[in-house]
Image (cartoon, rainbow, N blue to C red):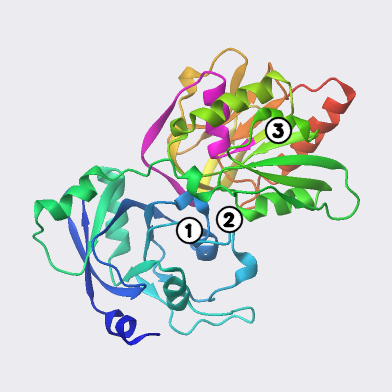
Amino acid sequence: MGEAQKSMTGQPVYLMLANGRVFEGKSFGAPTDGLVGEVVFTTGMVGYLETLTDPSYAGQIVVQTFPLIGNYGMIPEDYESKGIYLSAYIVKEWCKAPSNYRCQGDLDSMLREKGIPGIYGIDTRELARTIREAGTMNGLISTHKPPYLEEELAPMRSYRVDHPVDRVSPQETVIYPAEGERRYKVVLWDYGAKANIHRELQKRGCEVIDVPAASTAEEILALQPDGVMLSNGPGDPEDNEGVIREIRKITDARMPVFGICLGHQLLALAKGAKTGKMKFGHRGGNQPVKNLETGRVYITSQNHGYEVLADTLPAGAEQSFINVNDGTCEGVRYTDTPAYTVQFHPEACGGPKDTEWLFGKFLELMDENRKGDAVCR
């Protein structure tokens, strides 16, 4: 650690929310001053490695409500991407001496290496309660106490997570071979995909062709896949006009499609539905969703701030899952094309594995399409 960074660690730092509320904490990770971002919270008790490396958090200041973070250290094999795209990381307490046989470093060192500022010592549950009651809002991180000048506050007031898919999507196509015999060829349309999506497909006999968000439908269909996976990703789904147009072409070609999170929202938009921003979103590993066909409730991992508005779904689209807590749309089944999508993460990591069976459903859909009778059930 450089001398400048040493001197910053443990120094007072302030988080000011757009509603004027200020929280005082201490600095760790990379030093910063004047940073702005959208402040969101996640309730996960485990999985901080996956949270840190999930591209869906691009442009956001992430608050962990669980009080101790970093206790099992840094484990690169568990990362969901190669980078960290969140803007800053806020915890109640960070563990300075992690203990795990797979540990390859500590949280503070990783944040410094990646240039990500951290704050500890904040009452994170009170901060989360504030966001839950007032709604997601922007925040300013500063090393000096308020009050602040208007020119200091202006970037916070105008901040927006703008077109982040362009930043997190890969620039080149990458092929991941199937584990064992290849049974299917799947295109993963990568808007900021978590690595466990392609792992779950690979172990089910899928060769996964990971393509950039900017790929065209013609390029994807030319690969002659058995199916297309629409990945998770960050930001407002309506920002992705070009992608939405290309997805519409894929469904017109009756290609089997499975969408997760942002992919769920993008397909709904491509079919004519609408999306909206939620008050504070769903982030964590404890979200209950109900299968409307069977009545069964599953506990799921989620990370999103936008929702598909169920009352805007067009003919040929049926809501398949709802959130038990707030009734929001958690899944859509399409009857006019072989496609289905979910708002939650069946690949979990971290989180419950209750809905991994949805990957098997995707395989069944691809099998049916080979026979020429694919219908989403």
Does 272 appear in magenta?
A: yes
Q: Quadrant of residue 125?
A: bottom left
Q: Quadrant of residue 196?
A: bottom right
Which callout, 2 or 3, points at the residue further toward the start of the chain? Answer: 3
Identify which residue is drawn at 10% across, 58% down. 148
Which callout, 3 or 1, points at the residue further toward the start of the chain? Answer: 1
Q: Find residue 135 and name its label.
A: none
The reply to whether callout 2 and callout 1 are in contact (CB within 8 Å) is yes
Identify which residue is drawn at 52% across, 50% down. 168
Magenta residues, start to end: 259-285
Crowding at label 3, few (<14), some or many (≥20) Cα neighbours within 10 Å? few
176 versus 24 height, above or below: above
- Callout 2 amino acid: Gly
SS label for mark 1: loop
How far apart are labels 2 and 3 at the CA level?
Answer: 34 Å
SS label for mark 3: helix
- Callout 3 amino acid: Glu
Report the mark closest to the observer, 3 or 1.
Answer: 3
How far apart are labels 3 and 1 at the CA level?
Answer: 38 Å
242 versus 262 height, above or below: above
Q: Position of residue 165 (x, y in %)?
A: 50, 43
- Which image quadrant: the N terminus? bottom left
**Residue in the foreground of this view, choosing between 324 and 319:** 319
Residue holding disc 3: 219
- Callout 1 amino acid: Gly
Q: Position of residue 241 (x, y in %)?
A: 49, 28
Residue holding disc 2: 351
